[in-house]
Amino acid sequence: MSDGAEGARKFRWVGTRPVRPDGVDKVTGRARYGADLALPGMLWGRVLRSPHAHARILAIDASRALAMEGVKAVVSAEDLPEIRSEQAFVGEGPTDFRDLSHNVMARGKVLYHGHAVAAVAATSAELAERALAGIDVEYEVLPAVLDLDAALAPDAPLLHEDLVTKGVNPPPQRASNVAERVEMGHGDVEAGLARADVVVEREFTTRPVHQGYIEPHAALAEIGEDGRATIWCSSQGHFMVRAYTAKLLGMELSSIRVIPAEIGGGFGGKTTVYLEPVATLLARKSGRPVKMVMSREEVFRATGPTSGTRIRVKMGCTRDGRLTGADAHLEYEAGAFPGSPVTAGAMTIFAPYDVADVRIVGLDVVLNTPKVAAYRAPGAPMAAFAAESAVDELARRIDLDPIEFRLRNAAREGVQAPYGPRFKRIGHVETLEAARAHPHYRAPLLPNQGRGVASGFWFNAGLQSSADVHINEDGSVVVTSGNPDIGGSRASLAILAAEELGIDYARVSPIVADTSQVAYSDLTGGSRVTFATGMAVVEAARSVVRQLRERAAAIWEVDLDDVEWRDGAARLRAGAGREPLGLAELAARAARTGGPLAGHASLTARGVGAAFGTHICDVEVDPETGSVRVVRYTAVQDAGRAIHPSYVEGQMQGGVAQGIGWALNEEYLFDADGVMQNPGFLDYRMPVASDLPMIDAVIVEVPNPGHPYGVRGVGEVPIVPPIPAVANAIHDATGVRMRELPMSPPRVLEALEREG
Amino acid sequence: MSDGAEGARKFRWVGTRPVRPDGVDKVTGRARYGADLALPGMLWGRVLRSPHAHARILAIDASRALAMEGVKAVVSAEDLPEIRSEQAFVGEGPTDFRDLSHNVMARGKVLYHGHAVAAVAATSAELAERALAGIDVEYEVLPAVLDLDAALAPDAPLLHEDLVTKGVNPPPQRASNVAERVEMGHGDVEAGLARADVVVEREFTTRPVHQGYIEPHAALAEIGEDGRATIWCSSQGHFMVRAYTAKLLGMELSSIRVIPAEIGGGFGGKTTVYLEPVATLLARKSGRPVKMVMSREEVFRATGPTSGTRIRVKMGCTRDGRLTGADAHLEYEAGAFPGSPVTAGAMTIFAPYDVADVRIVGLDVVLNTPKVAAYRAPGAPMAAFAAESAVDELARRIDLDPIEFRLRNAAREGVQAPYGPRFKRIGHVETLEAARAHPHYRAPLLPNQGRGVASGFWFNAGLQSSADVHINEDGSVVVTSGNPDIGGSRASLAILAAEELGIDYARVSPIVADTSQVAYSDLTGGSRVTFATGMAVVEAARSVVRQLRERAAAIWEVDLDDVEWRDGAARLRAGAGREPLGLAELAARAARTGGPLAGHASLTARGVGAAFGTHICDVEVDPETGSVRVVRYTAVQDAGRAIHPSYVEGQMQGGVAQGIGWALNEEYLFDADGVMQNPGFLDYRMPVASDLPMIDAVIVEVPNPGHPYGVRGVGEVPIVPPIPAVANAIHDATGVRMRELPMSPPRVLEALEREG
């Protein structure tokens, strides 16, 4: 498992760029996404959503809807079992199942505009939509809490009357809108800051932004006469869908089968359930399959954006550019139920740096907006916005090149992270050095242009994965795993199998299996699939190789140790006299030598390698309009080892694109009643291809010693540096520090006018 | 693996009769069979079939069909690669892929009426049917060979001009219609018969009969832009469908995924392909999914019945009832391509008996009728008709009770079977004793009634099986295998898993996985699923139990050997101080103790246990009409151990029902041109419930030492004794020996008149 052995090896497939197995079907429109599935006799389900941001539900009367011809069932929270508060960790983070149940279907109160109140199933989508008007809900409207100040006010209206802040000792005597307080760090931050020659203290704010996946949530559920359910849906983890649906409906896991559709983007937003339990309930009540597909507006109003935040940082350094102390206070909006990514924000904010004295305090705050969901490196981009802006300011103050400043303070092997453990072999320094050496960093700038640099960190996840490697009778191979393929994992898993088995990549067929046909796997998230599921594939393939050697040894009547597996064939280690036995030959003889050849692995992945990236961004600011255009962008990232470099680059480019959108344009706009004003892609402005330059992705490989091929997760860290890289570039171009997102033309213009 | 250990054990689930998991969906019509599947944009395919029993194809012109609006593709043999003759053994028996290809689509010649010549895909089933008339085929009609005499005549027209009889030394100089000659036995049959006090020599004939499954063949195929195919179909083995389709179309196995539908009966007839390669070709050519469903008429005309046969036996015994010699000559019709079950007929004909001097010769004969397919205990029922009729006659001749006669000669452990090996522990004697002890055997008979007895033997198969046992996070269990469930194997596999794991049967969800989601498994056939796939489930479950003990040992910090698994929980073997850790608790802790709990097994099953049955049949013969009614029937069978007794009984009852239909009514009626005259269930008369008495199934358990639970296959042997049991009963009632099937009223009446 050490990199040493593999490091010296020449790879045949690892590091090459074959076409992804799902590619052709995806570009030709044949791939089946969540909404592409249909069953005979299927009904359509629609959700009735709250028109209020905060209100008590006094009564629900569905009789008018149920009287409509073709309306087959209506469900509300009454149809769901009451669930006690119970934290579970499935995939990306902790989930409280009572909250999840109440988010899926409001019970007692509605907590945000768009909150699901009831759902109807009817014989057509149009009829189901019309039937919503036949469900009468009586509300008592309550004052809504719509921003952090309002939520934290001493006399704030309470979303949850039993919510007592966790992490405070002694526990508070009364409820509040603060769900949790986290604190971490080491050393003495006051002493550290006192040693500094320069200190900056700044406050940054960010707005909720949506993951913006192209495919809206969609689910199709069917229940047999015996109560067993089958659910087809698009998600980041069908085992998660099974677990959450089972929990919410009080079902046993083995009575639910979830079959994954292709997924048209998730970015963390499909790590929870919205429609699946509702469709299942409607199917149970109507006795018919029920399909539900969200509109884009529903996606915006009722699925998780990420937190709006307010972050105060205070950082100090010596005149020669050594960080002496770092202090941060983070307030993250959780939306209607506890669970913002403030803990991850706190853990990551100073993680790229080796600072002796650090303190971070974070608050998880509920308010009457949609419950946040994970969004790519959850919590980290906002934290990086604050810290990397401050670092940039410190470097400027002592007149030190910002990359050099970061190099003098960069976390490296053995350094203690602010959240506790010491780093293993990591590549922050290597990404900084590669960025400094990149021609981009020395390229001239035009008038109104500026250059910014920022680094980013993400833990990456390990979690549980399973994989099967089945050898077909002709020696072709099927690799089965339980992770939806978002970023090209079919290709990376097939490459790993081909490499281990020594056969052609084209002979390997990777399959995303359903919950009943492969052992448990955690979510596709946490940048973990090529790392952890890849590890399972390698382990399963090695088990096959051992079986192949055993079969050859038996055929040749020699000891197992005399047989090696090389270039796709069993070979006698010493001496000659035996023709090598290739995979196809051994596969053809499998029936007579012991049976089918198959390897399996299930594991909780250890050896996760942390990821770092350093980005260089050039912007041009229009001083007349405040419009900011990214004119050049280079992202350098340590991938550990890039199994399929194109898809690593794709992850980097995608993360940067999302980060730039977040930096410059995206935001939830609520009116005074908490109604989102821009729930569509016309008004919620995500970057399109013409908004962005080609993003140059530079892969650095500092192999992760914890993975057999040195893999680190690559999917999340690229979204961490862009916001501060853009902000630092704007400062470089204009001399103005933007500390509020998005850095949209009006805000930039206002800042230019204020400070210029 | 020895029975000793398990024999003493008290079982919790083995031997009980829980509801089968697929039962409710099947009786309520929710289960999806081959024809129940649909895809958007799907076309319908239909097959153009030969109007001649034997003809040369001179030209095929599809231009008129292709000019029809909505007709999207036409295929013929030209679209299939030419395949060299190659024997393969997949599941039930040898297949020659060139013959298979030519059977799926006639190349050069048509060899039977109904033989596929071309196929069309169009936007509706009706249009596809109409389009067949737009395909012009020019034939040169050849003389057809329609019975054994015609086929064996020295100047017979040849079906295959290159067919040289195998198994003859030296090889014949010229082609014939005899594909193979088999010979087996031991000792000196002439000497053996010379020692006999009584010898009978008789000839028996049987007609082709169809497996008569209720569900016609159906397939739906789709091909992606990258050429990868997905096939949904009903079959006895989706791995077989994948293998055969790949072979016939020159595809790689990993580029085909076959998803099994439920199967509405197969009985051996769904162990080969007819529509699947054609639908796949049409899908490839049209770029659209293509669905094909046979009519009942097509099923009769163009899918495999079993052989018509002519069998001559000569058996002799001493006056005290010891068999001294047995000689047989078998001629089996193969239909249009070689491959009748004559070898199995030869192997089984005398297998129930311990005879020192035995010889069996068999011929595999081609003629211009549909290529035969496997049918439940292929080849054995006709052989048993001959041998068991002769045995009955010998017993009568020496005035010995026919069961006592059989007991004096019954094969038992250590006896050499006529086909070579010595029997392991078998239960023929026990079935005879149980039959003799059964009240039925002493019950009085009414006028015109008679009682017959017959025994039957079947090898049973082992072959390759794979199974996965996945433990869900809540401790519920999914058991995955690759065998379509025909006779209740989901239930038996779930019982075995529940027994091994010590948990509730209801917590186990058995799944039939597709070819990409489980390792290779051979056909559902050969009475092998509960035996061999069950063995894989047991092995996989034991692997899980070991993991569970390891996890508990790690949690308790004790040695693995100190932990036992009993009643669904890990328990400290000695001493107390530790609460047992149940499956659900260990499952909940899996993520932190090493990852998902899953067991897998792939094996070539050894230790197959041969099956024997002894049947008692009472008939009443109407002397006016020749009509025979079965008035009482008792089937005794050694099941080794009945995992789910109801489904063992169901197999026994089903086999008897089919055997009675074969005995009394079923037959293919061809006209002089080789056109089947009764291709529908009105004219091809299978028994319905009102035709039969309740069949009393008596299970005898002589555990098979080769299986961890003592299982023997149970599906096939029950069809072996009914034909001779009925014939012997008719003789008992009337004094007339029927030696020609079916024993239908006209034939019986004729025999009564001739002999009476």
Image (cartoon, coloured by chain):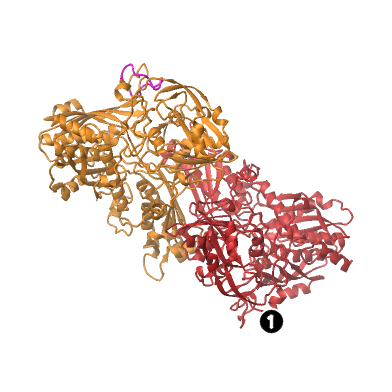
Chain colours: A orange, B red
Of residue B120 and residue A480, the one placed in the foreground of this image is B120
| Left or right of A630, for residue B670 | right
Q: Is residue A409 magenta?
A: no
Instruction: Give the image location of residue B399, x and y in percent.
Output: 85, 63
Magenta extent? A153-167
Q: Is residue A563 above or below residue A90?
A: below
Instruction: Give the image location of residue A710, x and y in percent.
Output: 30, 49
Dominant secondary structure, magenta: loop
Residue B718 sits in quarter: bottom right
Residue at the spot 12% in from the left edge and 30% down from the top edge: A198
Of residue A650 and residue A47, the one placed in the foreground of this image is A47
Instruction: Give the image location of residue A620, x and y in percent.
Output: 18, 42
Of residue A724 and residue B53, the one placed in the foreground of this image is B53
Q: Is residue A318 above or below residue A695?
A: above
Mark 1 highlights which residue? B154
Residue B20 sits in quarter: top right
| Left or right of B134, for residue A328 | left
| Left or right of A390, for residue A257 | right
Instruction: Give the image location of residue A552, x and y in percent.
Output: 44, 63
Q: Is residue A82 above or below residue A260?
A: above
Residue A612 sits in quarter: top left
Instruction: Residue type at mark 1: give it.
Output: Pro
| Residue A297 seen in the current view | yes
Of residue A28 and residue B463, the one placed in the foreground of this image is A28
Q: Chain of mark 1?
A: B
Q: Is residue A160 magenta?
A: yes
* Residue at the extreme bottom of the image, as rendered: B173
Q: The C terminus of chain B appears in which quarter of the rendering?
A: bottom right
- At numbered mark 1, what does the secondary structure look like: helix, strand or loop? loop
Q: Residues within 10 Å of mark 1 (few under 14, many from 20)?
A: few
| Residue B573 seen in the current view | no
Residue at the spot 31% in from the left edge and 42% down from the top edge: A716
